[in-house]
Image (tube, rainbow, N blue to C red):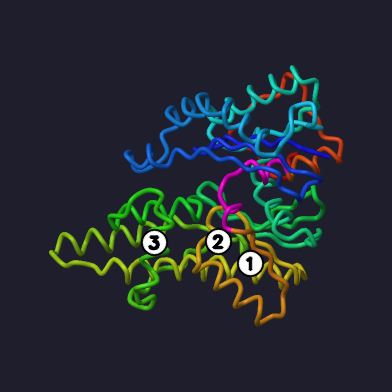
Amino acid sequence: MKILGIESSCDETACSVVEDGKTVLSNVVASQIDEHRLYGGVVPEIASRRHAENIGWVTREALEKAECTLEDIDAVAVTYAPGLIGALLVGVSFAKGLAMSAKKPLVPVHHIAGHIAANYISHPELKPPYLCLVVSGGHSHIVEVLDYTKYHVIGRTRDDAAGECFDKVARTLGYEYPGGKFIDAAAKNGDDKAFVLPHPKVQGSEYDLSFSGLKTAVINLVHNSQQKGIEINREDMAASFQKTIADILCQKLMLASENYGYTTIAVAGGVSANSGVREKIAAECEKRNYKLYLPELKYCGDNGAMIACQGYYDYLAGRRADMSLNAVATLSLENL
């Protein structure tokens, strides 16, 4: 079974053809990073316009690279929530037209479920139930994956997502957007014990996350030093900050795994590409003899393959959408 997956929730226009949920036949991504870098972050209106310009050729190229036509496609899967509403609308509208004209079923896919599904591509042997940490620019969740289409959110960020925190701290330190990769590179040359940074906690919720206070602490440290004419070592701050993020994420994930009885752990989302986060979680899982699954780096960020993969499982579960399908900016993973 071949699923065509379309992703346009933020600043990547992506399309992929995936066979039987795990074999990627094509995976085409048109990134807008260079343009948004001029503004230090994603500009929603620009993102929507570029999606409209790119989605046609991206889909054609995905079909060509998969050596198939629309007739060979069994269903069209598309990200409909959550994300930037204008960006989502481009993908949803295009997918609806494509499915209707080709007389193919239309499958609505939740973006976070797509990130989780990226691990099925890299690790075909992975099967629910297991615990998954989803960390990206817009999301930070600890999720019980009960089945391929059934989830229970144990913890989530109450303010900034981890990836958002990376970007804002990177900008404060003078790095370009997207900041995560620059922080990661700088951290390799820094002392991660140079700065003692806070580990914010959410009162009354042992699994929820909070990164706003950490972000503010770094910004204040940097600005106060600048006001005093003291130059902060960027590499040391990057290393200390990255270690703090990794420690926070890992501590919450390990706590949830122990209390809920999971020994199979997965990580997904753009921040799962961060070397500090990967190494910290890998070390803690090895200590406990847990089985850890990490997506290949090319499937950590937004891509069409993860949407096609999850679309396959949603299709098998009977999920379909008609021409009334609309984009949704925010939607819980549990409300599917």
Decide: few, some or many residues near mark 3? Use Cα within 10 Å; few <14, some 14-19, many ≥20.
many
Disc 2 marks a residue whose amino acid type is Gln
- Quarter holding the N terminus? top right
- Nearer to us: label 2 or label 1: 1
Q: Which residue is mark 2?
A: 203
- Nearer to us: label 3 or label 1: 3
Name the quadrant containing residue 17: top right
* Residue 44 can be seen, yes or no: yes
> Would you say the magenta stretch is mainly helix, strand or loop?
helix
Determine the residue positioned at 63% across, 36% down: 15
Q: Is residue 78 magenta?
A: no
Disc 3 marks a residue whose amino acid type is Ile
Labels 3 and 2: the sequence-earlier one: 3
> Is residue 197 shown left or right of residue 86?
left
Q: Position of residue 249 (x, y in %)?
A: 56, 65
Labels 3 and 1: the sequence-earlier one: 3
**Mark 3 and mark 2 residues within 8 Å of each other at the beta carbon:** no
Q: State the mark number for residue 253.
A: 1
Disc 1 marks a residue whose amino acid type is Leu
- Alpha carbon distance from label 3 to label 1: 22 Å
Q: State the mark number for residue 335.
A: none
- Alpha carbon distance from label 2 to label 1: 17 Å
Q: Which residue is mark 3?
A: 183
**Mark 2 and mark 1 residues within 8 Å of each other at the beta carbon:** no
- State the extent of the magenta-drawn residues as a range: 297-308
- Alpha carbon distance from label 3 to label 2: 29 Å
**Mark 3 and mark 1 residues within 8 Å of each other at the beta carbon:** no
Q: Position of residue 51 (x, y in %)?
A: 52, 29
**Which element is circle 2 on?**
loop
